[in-house]
Amino acid sequence: MSLPSAYVTGAFEHPTRHAPDKSIAQLHAECALGAVADAGLSLGDIDGYFCAGDTPGASPLYMADYLNLKLRWLDGTESGGCSYLMHVAHAAAAIAAGQCNVALITLSGRPRSEGQATGTAPRAGNSSQADEPFETPYRPTIAGMYGMFAMRHMHEFGTTAEQLAWVKVSASRHAQHNPNALLRNVVTVEDVLASPVVCDGIRRLDCCVITDGGGAAILTRPEIARSLSRPLVRVAGTGHTMHTQNGGYIDAVRTGAAASGAAAFAEAGVTPRDIKYASVYDNFTIMVVMQLEDLGFCPKGQGGRFVAEGSLISGVGRLPWNTDGGGLCNNHPANRGGMTKLIEAVRQLRGEAHPAVQVKNCDIALAAGPGRVVGSGHGHATAVLVRE
Amino acid sequence: MTTPSMSDETLRSLTAAAPEIRPFWEAARRGELLLAHCTACNRPHWFPRVVCPLCGSRDIEWREACGRGTVYSVSVARRATPPYALAYVTLDEGPTMLTNIVDCDVDGIAIGQKVKVVFKDRPGALPAPMFTPA
């Protein structure tokens, strides 16, 4: 692409995992300050702000007022957990178009303090959504929906619970090195299989954690990025999509990663083989397997075998993945994984991941994830980042 | 199968957010499963809409489904009391719908199993098409 590039110059993951004494606005503000400090900028430099439905008022207006940001560009794109990866694409486009120079993206929430049974409580319906009367009566839970994806994947491809467990095992091996991770204990395949079945296809250790906290990122124009002291991490390619229910002609073993990944790879001019590190949103182990297939890291249907070879373990496998411990072990603030995926990819490209999991010569990384589940449909976003 | 306890007024109230779908629920009250069928591309879709999601036509008419289908996937919620089966059922007419498999041993449900529709009377709520082993 010929558009001027944008650079990720600031990235901050809030260290908290339990914040009963902080408002969501405070968490957003602390994340914003963390990211601008990381970049070596100040709040006054921000002229573009991007946030999603987790933000107070579900609109960029409220945090912009709280922080008294002087903005030229606002974006409240809400697509669940992948919103922040979409924001990377939107911020890069806004920067390329000259609409802003310094873009701030924030995410925060406190589902742990609020006692949300995120995965196991039937989802609340919204009567303005046309599909609501065709979903709510059946008590679909997040875990139940992903359980059906897992059961179908097992049916079509012979994927096993043991293979899915390797995703959690890989995450736990990374999380042991992250002092902020909620779960730092290394687990085995046997541990995962011995954990209680939440619903068929999903055991407790197949599920991500529920944490308070958040994160933020700063994107800037190239000239600004070069004037700062941080390593240069360029947004090389982005893609996003809505993987719809297709009018009822669903395919529950495929994800939007096929479309968003292909777009991001094409724009970046790279292939899956070029990726040195991948952050792939791990709300449930099955979703990692399906996305790895759809992103092209292994053939469709071979994701279970791929992860069971230890492919995801840094220093061992061919695709070091979620080296912060991911959503399965480290952090899943606001029940949304996109921001933490971006942040660990930036750490890897900067060489700032924990030494035990840092990928050598990590110059091309990927961050990808889904957002929301609507029937079998979901949003999906992928970003390819390169270190210059 | 019918839900005589639901008055026309209650049904209107419960469908106020999407009045164009009311015929579906009126039929459901009679124990009939309707599909929104596009006469332009000759395909039914799910969930019902006034615009065909497959071809964009507004030529949609209601047609009664045969009420039979196949389990596309199923996951039993093991931590619920009692456990219940969340499922996708692919209707013989083509579309796949989210539903529950009911009136059976949840441990015996398998992908590929043939099922038939059964409407469940839910107090104060719209009757929901669910499925049971055929």
Image: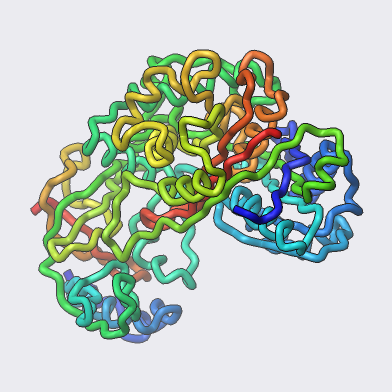
Residue A58 at x, y = what percent? 67, 61
Q: Nearer the viewer, residue B71 or A104?
A: A104
Residue A279 in picture, x, y percent from top left: 56, 34
In which quadrant of the rendered image does the C terminus of chain A lie?
Answer: top right
Residue at the spot 61% in from the left edge and 28% down from the top edge: A330
Quadrant in which residue B11 is drawn: bottom left
In terms of image quadrants, where is residue A336?
top right
In the image, residue A16 above or below residue B110: above
- At 37% from the left edge and 34% from the top edge, which residue is drawn? A202
Q: How many marks?
A: 0
Q: Which scheme is used to colour this image of the protein?
A: rainbow
Front residue of A238/A334: it is: A238
Image position of B60 (left or right of A259): left
Residue, x 66% and y 21% (percent of image)? A178
Q: Position of residue A13 (x, y in %)?
A: 72, 36
- At horizontal 32% and vertical 81% (from top left) the residue drawn is B22
Residue B27 screen position, x and y as percent: 22, 78
The answer to whether residue A209 is visible is no
**Horizontally, is B9 left or right of A27 in the view?**
left
**Residue that protrudes farthest toward the left in the picture:** B134
**Residue B101 seen in this snapshot:** yes
Front position in the image: A144 or A331 = A331
Position of A354 with respect to A271 (left or right) is right
